[in-house]
Amino acid sequence: MKQLASLFVLAAALAAPQAHGQRQDAVRGAVDAANRWLVPADAGDAAATWDQAAAAFQAGVSRADWTGALKRVRQPLGAVTSRKLVSSEFKRSLPGAPDGEYVVIQYDTQFAHKAHAVETVVPMRERDGSWKVSGYFVK
């Protein structure tokens, strides 16, 4: 029994780096997806952000409603003058969302008319394995 327990501990120890590496790959993929999604957001192309969003996002808000909402939030801020990645955290569960794979990404962003803002972008892994944005917030 002691030998079996030792094998279990060894197996868990060997699997941990692989799981950590997979999680790092997931975070990298999610950050890449968020950065791609922010390009049309920064250009004022709200419709393109909806087109590139996760299926769950698209099911939750119509294209027209999202386009109006994003424009109302972003236009008063003006153009992005700088954006710095502050954090990216892998999550399997988020409040109000089904369990899945998410990465909560925060950027310290400066806009022409707002010196300091925190943008939060939340990509999720789709069924096909791709990462697509499922949430966006500016504070």
Image: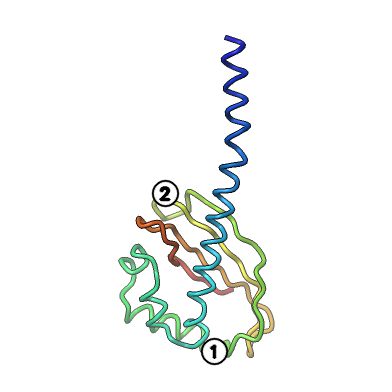
Q: Compare residues 69 and 109 and report the one nearer the observer.
A: 109
In the rendered image, residue 72, in percent from the top left (x then y), is placed at 46, 85
Left or right of 55 on screen, residue 3? right
- Examine the image and state in which quarter residue 138 appears: bottom right
The residue at the point 54 percent across, 48 percent down is: 22
Provide residue 38's location: percent of width, then percent of height: 51, 77
Question: Label 1 to label 2, Cα distance in Å?
Answer: 34 Å
Image-quadrant location for residue 66: bottom left
- Give the residue at x 60% y 66%: 106
Crowdedness of circle 1 by 10 Å Cα count: few (<14), some, many (20+)? few
Name the amino acid type tagged 2: Asp
Q: Taking 57 as reference, is 107 left or right?
A: right
130 and 84: which is toward the camera: 130
- The residue carrying mark 2 is 99
Residue 91 drawn above or below residue 12: below
Is disc 1 placed on a helix, strand or loop?
helix
Quadrant of the snapshot with the N terminus: top right
**Residue with the mark numbered 1:** 76
Question: How many numbered marks have been drawn onto this rendered protein structure?
Answer: 2
